[in-house]
Image (tube, rainbow, N blue to C red):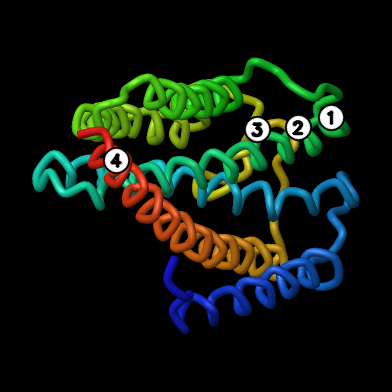
């Protein structure tokens, strides 16, 4: 693999610094919530991971459209990279949500519309990765991936809007007030911390995504050499 571009090296260092800054803001800058106490601070990284994870799934859908339009394999690499990284971010969001829910809802998990749609969304993209492994032909695999991520992307707005469309105990975080059990009013410092965390995790996503695309290009080259050797 070629040496990392200078911009990627800068992003590596910047990501580490931003994560440290976000941690400082969560621990020291954001005030302690009066009712929930310390567990509320999980909220900042929970929201940031969920937001970035869903954006990554949407990016994979656009990559699928681009592949179907151009048949350029680079878009398949982009789609796979976006899905793999988003799966990790979204799983962290689900896990941190459970950590928050136990002291607030007195349960680690409940089949609330938001939690249910989030779990289904995670399984949809886990299935995507598993099903890809069963397709040996690169062109068929890429076409399947493009169509799958395009259709799978439809579940993202449903997950996002579930707390607005259905009766739910999950708080409405962005827009729509503080509805839902465990909802709370945010001070300016809390809002600053939340939006800064979203920005930080967006930068981390871009950094990891760039690394994964580079790895995908190397894997594609290896596969091309294997197919050539088999001819």
Task: Assess whether mark 1 and mark 2 are in contact (beta carbons under 8 angstroms).
Answer: yes
Of badges 4 and 1, nearer the viewer stands 4
Disc 4 + disc 2, Cβ < 8 Å: no
* Tag 2–tag 3 contact (CB < 8 Å): no
Instruction: Give the labeled residue for mark 1.
Output: 102
According to the picture, the residue beneath numbered tag 4 turns out to be 61
Instruction: Give the Cα distance between marks 2 and 3.
Output: 15 Å
CA gap between label 4 and label 2 equals 28 Å
Disc 4 secondary structure class: helix
Residue 228 at what x, y percent from top left?
A: 23, 41
Q: Secondary structure at mark 2?
A: helix
Q: Could you say which quadrant of the image residue 102 lies in?
A: top right
Q: Earlier in the sequence, mark 3 or mark 1?
A: 1
Name the residue carrying label 2: 98
Q: Residues within 10 Å of mark 4 (few under 14, many from 20)?
A: many
Number of on-image labels: 4
Q: Label 3 to label 1, Cα distance in Å? A: 15 Å
Label 4 vs label 3: CA separation? 30 Å
Residue 180's label in the rendered image is 3
Work out whether residue 44 or residue 207 is closer to the camera in this orientation and state it.
Answer: 207
Q: Is residue 16 above or below residue 64?
A: below
34 with respect to 191 (left or right):
right
Q: Quadrant of the N terminus?
A: bottom left
Q: For the residue labelled by badge 3, is the local secondary structure a helix, a strand or a loop?
A: loop
Residue depicted at x 76% and y 32%: 98
What residue is shown at x 53% (from left), y 28% (from top)? 122
What element does badge 1 sit on? helix
Within 10 Å of disc 3 (Cα), the crowding (few <14, some 14-19, many 20+) is some
Mark in front: 4 vs 3: 4
């Amino acid at each position: 693999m070629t040496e990392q571009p200078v911009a990627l090296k800068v992003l590596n260092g910047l990501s580490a610094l931003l994560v440290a800054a976000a941690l400082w803001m969560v621990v020291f800058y954001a005030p302690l919530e009066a009712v929930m106490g310390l567990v509320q601070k999980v909220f900042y990284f929970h929201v940031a991971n969920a937001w970035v994870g869903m954006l990554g799934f949407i990016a994979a859908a656009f990559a699928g459209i681009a592949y179907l339009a151009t048949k350029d394999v680079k878009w398949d690499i982009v789609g796979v990279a976006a899905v793999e990284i988003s799966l990790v971010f979204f799983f962290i969001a689900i896990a941190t949500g459970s950590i928050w829910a136990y002291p607030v809802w007195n349960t680690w998990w409940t089949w609330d519309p938001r939690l249910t749609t989030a779990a289904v969304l995670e399984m949809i993209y886990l299935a995507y990765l598993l099903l890809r492994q069963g397709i040996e032909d690169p062109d068929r695999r890429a076409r399947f991936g493009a169509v799958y991520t395009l259709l799978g992307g439809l579940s993202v707005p449903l997950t996002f809007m579930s707390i607005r469309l259905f009766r739910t105990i999950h708080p409405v975080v962005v827009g729509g007030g503080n509805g839902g059990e465990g909802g709370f009013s945010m001070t300016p410092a809390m809002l600053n911390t939340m939006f800064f965390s979203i920005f930080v995790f967006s930068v981390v996503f871009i950094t990891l995504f760039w690394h994964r695309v580079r790895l995908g290009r190397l894997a594609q080259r290896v596969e091309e050499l294997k197919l050539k050797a088999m001819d």
